Image (cartoon, coloured by chain):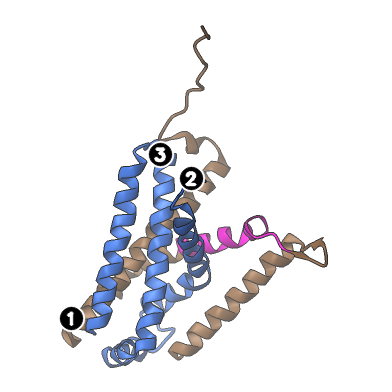
Chain colours: A blue, B brown
Amino acid sequence: MARSNKPVAWSLFAGGGTLAAFLTPVLIIITGLAVPLGFLSGDILSYERALTVLQNPFGKLVIFGIIFLQLWHAAHRLRITAHDFGIRADTAVMIICYGLAALATVVTIFTLLNI
Amino acid sequence: MSRKPFIRPVQTTSWWLNQGRYIRYMIREATCILIGAYSAVLIVGLIRLGEGKIAYEAYLAAVQSPMGMMFHIVALAFALYHTTSWFNVTPKAMPLTFADKRVPGGLIIGAHYAGWIVISGIALFLVGA
C-alpha cells in the first residue's frame, strides 16, 4: 500500500475542526468581545490574571492545544480550498499552508515557554 | 485514434458563484481564514504578554478598539458558520449505530448542539462570567 501523510493531515483537520466548532465562538467572545461590550468585567483579561494562567503548565498546555489545533485545521482547509480556486500547484500550496502553521506552532511553543 | 475528449469548460476561480449551495460551500471553506487569523491574534497576545505589562495592555487596547472589535465580530460570524456547518454534517462524517440500528441524524446533530452549549457555558464559568 502506498504510504501517505493524508491520515495525519486529516486527523489534525478533523480534530481541529471539532475543537473549533465547540470552542472558537465562545473563545472569540471571551478574548475579543465580552469586555468591550460590558458583558464581562475587564479583570478577566488583566495582565496579572493572564500571567497567572499562562505561567501555569496546565494553562500553557490548554492554550497551546487550542491554538495548535485551530492552526492546523485552518491550514489544511486552506490547502484544499486553493484547489477549488483552480490552483493546481498542490506541493507549493502545501508547503505554504503547512509551513505557516508549523512556524506559528513553533512561535507559540517558544512564546509560552518564555512567559 | 480517439476523438478529442470533451472537457466541460469551467471558470476556475468563479465557478462557485453560480449556485447558492456552492456559495455556502465557499463560505464554509472561507471560515478557515478567520479561524487562522484569530489564532494569529491570540499568538500576538501571548507574545505581548511575555513582553510585559505595557505591551500587553497596548495589545488589549488594540483588540478592544473599534477596528479590533470589528475583526472579532466578523471572526465570530464565520466561527458560528463553521460550528453549524460542522455539526450539521456529523451524521454523514460520523454515522453511529446502536443495537444494529442507525442512530437518527437529528439525534447526532442535536447532541452536538447540546454539548456545544454546555462547553460554552463551562468556558464562560471558568473565566468568571
Mark 2 and mark 1: Cα distance apart in space: 50 Å
Q: Choose between A7 and A73: the one closer to the eye.
A: A7
Q: On screen, B64 above or below A101?
A: below
Secondary structure beneath dot 3 equals loop
| Residue A93 visible here | yes
Q: Residue at x 26, y 89 (%)?
A: A47
Image marks 2 and 1: residues in contact by CB distance under 8 Å: no
Residue A33 screen position, x and y as percent: 39, 76
Q: Residues within 10 Å of mark 3 (few under 14, many from 20)?
A: some
Q: Residue at x 42, y 67 (%)?
A: A69
Instruction: Name the amino acid type tagged 1.
Output: Ala
Q: Which residue is mark 1?
A: B55
Q: On screen, B42 above or below A92?
A: below
Q: Residue at x 46, y 49 (%)?
A: A3
Q: Nearer the viewer, mark 3 or mark 1?
A: 3
Confirm whether circles 2 and 1 share one chain.
Answer: no
Residue B69 screen position, x and y as percent: 34, 70
Task: Specify the label residue A2 is tagged with.
Answer: 2
Q: Choose between A34 and B81: the one closer to the eye.
A: B81
Confirm whether circles 3 and 1 share one chain.
Answer: no
Please say whether residue B75 is one of the residues in the magenta stretch.
Answer: no
Instruction: Name the amino acid type tagged 3.
Output: Phe
* Residue stretch rendered in magenta on the structure: B77-96
Quarter of the rendering containing residue A38: bottom left
Task: Specify the label residue A80 is tagged with.
Answer: none
Mark 3 and mark 1: Cα distance apart in space: 39 Å
Q: Which residue is mark 3?
A: A85
Q: Choose between B64 and A51: the one closer to the eye.
A: A51
